[in-house]
Image (cartoon, coloured by chain):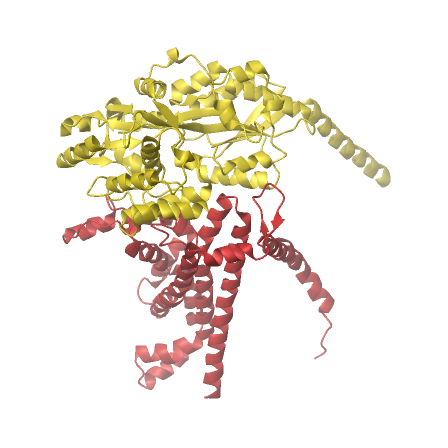
Amino acid sequence: MVRENNTGKIILFLLPMMVLYILFFLFPLLYNLSLSYQEWNGITKPSFVGWENYKNLLKDEIFLKSVKNNLLWALVNGFIQVPLAAGVAFILARQPRFWKSLRVIYFLPKVISGVAIAMMWRAIYNPSYGVLNAFLGIFGNEPVNWLGQIGTALPAVMFQEVVYIGYFMIIILASVMSIPVSLYEAAQIDGANVFQQEMNITIPMVKTTLITAITLAMAYGMRHFEATFLMTNGGPAHSTTVMGLLLYNKMAAFNYGEATATGTILIIMGTLVIIVMRRLFRDNDNASVSQ
Amino acid sequence: MKKGLIFVLFVVLISSFAFAGGQQEQGEVTIKWPSIWVGKDSKAPAVAALVQQFNEENAGSIKVEVEEQPNYDGYREKIRTSIAAKIIPDFFTINPSPTSLAYYDSDGILDFNEVMDADWKAMYNEGTIAQATHKGMLKSLPYEVAITPVWYNKALFDKAGASIPSNWSEMQDVMAKLKAAGIIPTSQMTGGSNAWTSMLWYSHFVASLGGPSAWDKPLSDPIYVKAAEMLLELYSDGNTSIDAIGGDAGVSGGHFLAGETAMFINGPWYIGRVKNDAPEVYANTMVDSAPAAGSNAGAQIGFLQTNLIAADLRESDPAKHEAIVAFTKWMSAPDNVARISKEAGSMFAIKFDSAMIDDPLQKSFIEAANSAAFTNKHLAGVFKAEVVSEFGQALGKMALGDATPAEFVEMLDKANK
């Protein structure tokens, strides 16, 4: 086969996206980085302050709390939400009755506005008229202020996000459905039960998809903002605060220096999470290959 | 032939551009106003009517286009980013605060000192122009002012056999009576961007404990801890609703509107809401100063609520500049201000004939303002945004028993530094 020299064409096709990427990602990223070394209220001329903004953040208990919460979000999304999604995908891939309807039902919340979902959960958690307390009241439980107590607020916000598995379920389901049926038939003949089939056929076959889903879920956890902003605004007592919210509040206070420093740390941490995840699973891959 | 056709098309195209440009130059000037006074805002109908009338009276020369911004946080975000990007809206409003004073550093905002004569300035109530002046500049014009007295639901007080408390000891007795009658004494909230209702209660206590110059005292002064102890008591033993911690303005206002809480704090702009959504509560509401927490009784929390701002287009677009000034004068005209006040219940920095106000609750607001022993700002009008946003978080922590009143004040002090 004669290999054509397509370099020129490839560059031509990639160029528009590369220009957009530079304009709307790399340039803002570098600008963000440069602002993080300055003190700026967004109106007057910025002044260079070196590492001061970063030092202030690292001394700030609220910032450290937000980092911890973001890491928790990443772990919960990656290691609770994705396994739940995988479990449902494995079941639906076996095409039980109404599996197509169930697939749509599970995915439906993903197409609904996050604001509407957050507002709905605020109503569910409301201590006075919320359906959750009403339900628990049947069993004689006292009303609980789910979003107003330090011990319950963060789990409550996390639960309303983790329970919507539709996005990852669809990704994993598509991957599971592409596994040849003959593999399962062969396993059945060999006497493997459903659990053994899932463990020894499905999971190894969709491993790459699972890793991608976990990485994506953790990245979403690192940048989490919307539901916390709408449901608790970081409270009570900063117990649910996240870096995105801190960044937003610093911008609202015209503290663009610390806001961009927060943004930079957020980007670095997000990148680190992805690198760690890739390295972790790559090492596992290598280990399994050498075995 | 083909070349000739292309030439003709080219000429037509160029002339159409030139004609369009000429039309824009000679046509009416358009003022764009991103406005929060839309939708369900109580001022929306009166403001819309005034804009429409202005447009009709200036048809062909000036047109005001309102860009609807029904969400407060979204609106503030838009204004802030627009100014940071040096794309100043033609005309807009701000809630004056130490943080929004940063706008005064913008070159693109009009200093009203440059366009206002003595007659125009004389239209304003004493001291309001001075309050809006910063570094010698008047880059925002006082418009809506407010006092935030305590709203008392008399029907609930009667039901509990209680009378309006005049001091803290009476307040404690009243709360006990209300609870005994199954009534929640106060509306509170730690949520939202500034824990508005509770922040106002705290401001009342600070004013009463510290007097007219209370906010001049540093946060290390004992009055702040004492006021925090009182606020904590309002959060304790069922003195507020279960959802106050984490609750927002919808929670604190909602309980009062539902006739569940006996005491609530807000400004006159809320009159329209109570009147429309809870007529029974409206009929039973009276406003008065908060019970004296210290030796200074009869204080009110009063402040500039909304100021008008305009882009400085004197050099870049003199025609639009003139149009903006004309519109600012229109919106500030005493008769027009009176129209908004009458319909929405708002109070203004501009003097107008209050005899036309027939709403009893609105009248009592004016009486409360006139009879105030002294008027102090609220916490959000004194401290920077970091302290204001920390207030709700620190309050939540204190109300949950994770911080003492002294630690609550320490958290504010830390945010202030």
Rendering coords of residue B300 (x, y %): 35, 26
**Residue name at image x 36 percent, y 48 percent:** A231
Of A167 and B160, nearer the camera is B160
Vertical order, B312 against A254 (above or below):
above
- Left or right of residue B240, residue A258 in this image: right
Of B318 and A54, nearer the camera is A54
Vertical order, A105 against B245 (above or below):
below
Of B157 and A213, nearer the camera is B157
- Left or right of residue B244, residue A211 in this image: right
- Left or right of residue A265, residue A111 in this image: left
Q: Is residue A119 visible?
A: no
Vertical order, A162 against A250 (above or below):
below
In the rendered picture of this protein, how many numbered marks are placed on residues?
A: 0
Q: Extreme bottom residue here?
A: A291
Q: Is residue A7 visible?
A: yes
Q: Quadrant of the N terminus of chain A?
A: bottom right
Rendering coords of residue B132 (x, y %): 51, 27
Rendering coords of residue A43 (x, y %): 59, 41
Q: Which chain is red?
A: A
Of A282 and B212, nearer the camera is B212
**Residue name at image x 40 percent, y 80 percent:** A183
- When asked about the image quadrant of residue B224, the answer is top left
Q: Colour of chain B?
A: yellow
